[in-house]
Amino acid sequence: MIQLESVSKHFDGKRKVTALDQVSLSISKGEMVSIVGASGSGKSTLLNLIGGLDRPSSGEIIIDGQSLTKISDDELTKVRRDKIGFIFQFFNLLPTLNCAENVALPLHLRGWNRKRTEQRARELLELVKLGQRLEHLPEELSGGERQRVAIARALAVYPPILLADEPTGNLDSHTGAEILTLIRDLHHRLQTTILIVTHDMGVAESCQRTIRLRDGRIIEDLRR
């Protein structure tokens, strides 16, 4: 499902910084994988490259059989739209839209009609146990509820890949545990391939596999 072949990422400034250094990695369909490492180890860079939010300096990235290396920006946008869902630490919900509207936004961008869009948004919010919050604005929700809305939005088109960057990092321990349970449940139900960047070893150890980075390189690949 996800394959990286000798992928490097450099950032040029006053001095050249190597965020990823010759990383090769293969992740099978349906795996739930955590990515850990100290700050600056390359975790978020790796996730951004896999998600098509950035391009590698060298090497090849293949998503569901399609190489991302030489495709156009428009083609890369289509891969993100159709194959990848993103969950962010700070939710990234639009404050002026209610829950259903936030979840429906990716569907509007795909040109879905109003009836179909509203039905899918309701279905997804019920899936994450927020069927009673359809018309609530983000400011009317708790942190855990906002993250549930963000997860529902990430699943809008039932993408085969879900990328989560510190999904519990902005939540208290109890709420974080609830969100992790939800992600695991969705993984079981939908058989989505899930990658989670985290500093929380409890989150990391709940995954089938943990990849540890240091200085832009994989130093450990542990399967459970």
Image (cartoon, rainbow, N blue to C red):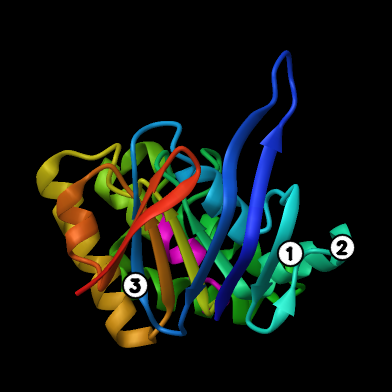
Instruction: Specify the amino acid type for callout 3.
Output: Met
**Residue tagged 3:** 32
Near mark 3 (Cα within 10 A), the count class, few <14, some 14-19 or many ≥20, is many
Location of residue 18 (image quadrant) = top right
**Residue tagged 2:** 74
User: Cα distance, mark 3 to mark 1?
Assistant: 28 Å
Near mark 1 (Cα within 10 A), the count class, few <14, some 14-19 or many ≥20, is few
**Residue tagged 1:** 109
Near mark 2 (Cα within 10 A), the count class, few <14, some 14-19 or many ≥20, is few
Location of residue 222 (image quadrant) = bottom left
Horizontal arrangement in the rendering, residue 202 relative to residue 32 (left or right): left
Task: Tell me, yes or no, if residue 1 can be seen here.
Answer: yes
* Mark before the other along the chain sequence, 3 or 1: 3
Instruction: Specify the amino acid type for callout 1.
Output: Leu
Image position of 27 with respect to 48: above or below: below
In magenta segment, residue 9: no
Residue drawn where x is 47% and y is 61% of the image: 163
Between label 3 and label 1, give the one nearer the viewer: 3
User: Cα distance, mark 2 to mark 3?
Assistant: 28 Å
* Mark before the other along the chain sequence, 2 or 3: 3
Residue drawn where x is 56% and y is 44% of the image: 45
Q: Secondary structure at mark 2?
A: helix
* Mark before the other along the chain sequence, 2 or 1: 2
Mark 3 touching mark 1, by CB under 8 A?
Answer: no
Mark 2 touching mark 1, by CB under 8 A?
Answer: no
Task: Tell me, yes or no, if residue 129 can be seen here.
Answer: no
Q: 55 or 212: nearer the eye?
A: 212
Mark 2 touching mark 3, by CB under 8 A?
Answer: no
Residue stretch in magenta: 150-158
Identity of the residue furthest to the left in this view = 174
